[in-house]
Image (cartoon, rainbow, N blue to C red):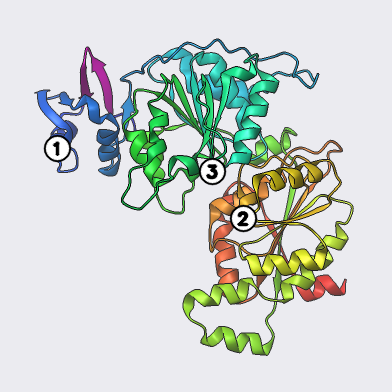
Amino acid sequence: RYGRIKLIREGDALLLTSNDVALMAEVYHHKRTQPYILRQLNSHTIQVDASRRGHIKQALIHIGFPAEDLAGYTDGSPLPVKLRDMTLQGDEFAPRAYQYAAAAAFYAGGAPSGGSGVVVLPCGAGKTIVGLAAMADIQRATLILSPNTIAVRQWINEILDKTDIPPEMVGEYTGDRKDICPITVSTYQILTYRPSEDADFPHFSLFTSYDWGLIIYDEVHLLPAPVFRVTAEIQARRRMGLTATLVREDGREADVFSLIGPKKYDVPWRELERQGWIATAECHEIRVSMTEDEQLNYAVAEEREKYRLAAESPAKLTVTRYLAERHRDDQVLIIGQYIDQLKVLAEELEAPLLTGKTANRQREKLYDQFRRGELKRLVVSKVANFAIDLPDANVAIQVSGTFGSRQEEAQRLGRILRPKIDGGLAYFYSIVTRDTRDQEFSANRQLFLTEQGYRYVIEDAEMLLAS
């Protein structure tokens, strides 16, 4: 149904047009769209409130008729950007063919059909480079939004390393600093901060504080609800979403489609694996059993507590220890949801623990030690779900997660998918407790990756340990 209705601009007027007369009659009379309609010009054309461009698109997608937005964009402040042939590190550089293709599909040669949409690429496939290529195409001031401060600094490093933009033109807008420059990189967290529940969001002014020609939403599947609201108000700015998966556990995929734009480019994970751009991964689900006492406690627990009891099963510690020893020469991430469980694992494995409470400076230090191979193991909470560049990580052991989140499963596998210098495999282990909510949620978590062609080898923990 996408494209049966088009949103165009004639002078200052914003118009909905369609060749389908019956469809336009339905739109004109529908209660979801009526608040934004100014008048019907003819049976094919409706004039809508130009200041509510995002809202009318949301209304249309929710009644089942997503509009193709051809109303164009504000140019934004000019900013010459050129990609380097040689990085600051002295390495030859050029975007890969699929990265060029993704940026070109987004930009569409500057036509109104381009300039808004989502690029879907696997973790480790270089989505940041697609963003840089789009900046070089558009040549305008750019605001980049990312999940956390570590990701902000990774973006800034990539911009300086791979474009000719000087450092004084690139700003960080986070809890630590508030620089606004022609290229500014910020976090969803700072944007959604407010001093109290009833207060306004003071940092939303960032969207209007500069004449942006492009806004890049990194990890767009994580876009918080308040940022949807402000994005509805800035539809005249070019908007690029970057993500490994369009799956949102809150069901707001339609809002991403209507406010950021439709999917412009997508490559199956296995295709990039075959081409050698991401590592070949083996996925294993290892099932542990509860003791009789644990089964009894589980049986009488409240529904929500059942998952936690199963997810924190002590049997997982033994399997994790075994796997960590099996991969003692590899770079291993142990990932989980529950901090108490992770503390026990970190102590048992004599590995640092990294959580949301770990200061950014300490996080960067630990990540750097891991990248250099000085640390072989890191125990990490949900902070490792997204936007962390650990290219040498080749083993992930998942002990617990956010219920049945398909998005989280994809992100966690993605942590180990950067291609290895030696061409080696990546290993993803998910340890689950048999015949419990943990196993049920695990099956749901795996859905996105199985659709991408991944297969999980099911293993029994007792047999594994006996071997």
- Is 8 colored magenta in this rendering? yes
Residue 17 visible in the displayed image = no
Checking the image for residue 245, the label placed there is 3
Judging from the image, what secondary structure is the residue with disc 1 in?
helix
Q: Which residue is mark 2?
A: 357
Of the two numbered discs 3 and 1 on the same chain, state the one appearing first in sequence.
1
Checking the image for residue 150, the label placed there is none
Q: Nearer the viewer, residue 343 or 329?
A: 343
Checking the image for residue 34, the label placed there is 1
Q: Nearer the viewer, mark 2 or mark 1?
A: 2
Say which residue appears at 75% left-offset and 19% top-offset: 88
Q: Which residues are magenta?
A: 5-19
User: Is 337 situated left or right of 423 in this image?
Assistant: left
Between the residue at mark 3 and the residue at mark 1, the CA separation in whole angstroms equals: 33 Å
Judging from the image, what secondary structure is the residue with disc 3 in?
loop
Q: Amino acid at mark 3?
A: Thr
User: Is 129 situated left or right of 232 in this image?
Assistant: right
Say which residue appears at 65% left-offset and 13% top-offset: 164
Q: Amino acid at mark 1?
A: Gln
Q: Nearer the viewer, mark 2 or mark 3?
A: 2
Between the residue at mark 2 and the residue at mark 1, the CA separation in whole angstroms equals: 47 Å
Q: Dominant secondary structure of the magenta stretch?
A: strand
Q: Position of residue 253 (x, y in %)?
A: 41, 44
Of the two numbered discs 2 and 1 on the same chain, state the one appearing first in sequence.
1
Of the two numbered discs 2 and 3 on the same chain, state the one appearing first in sequence.
3
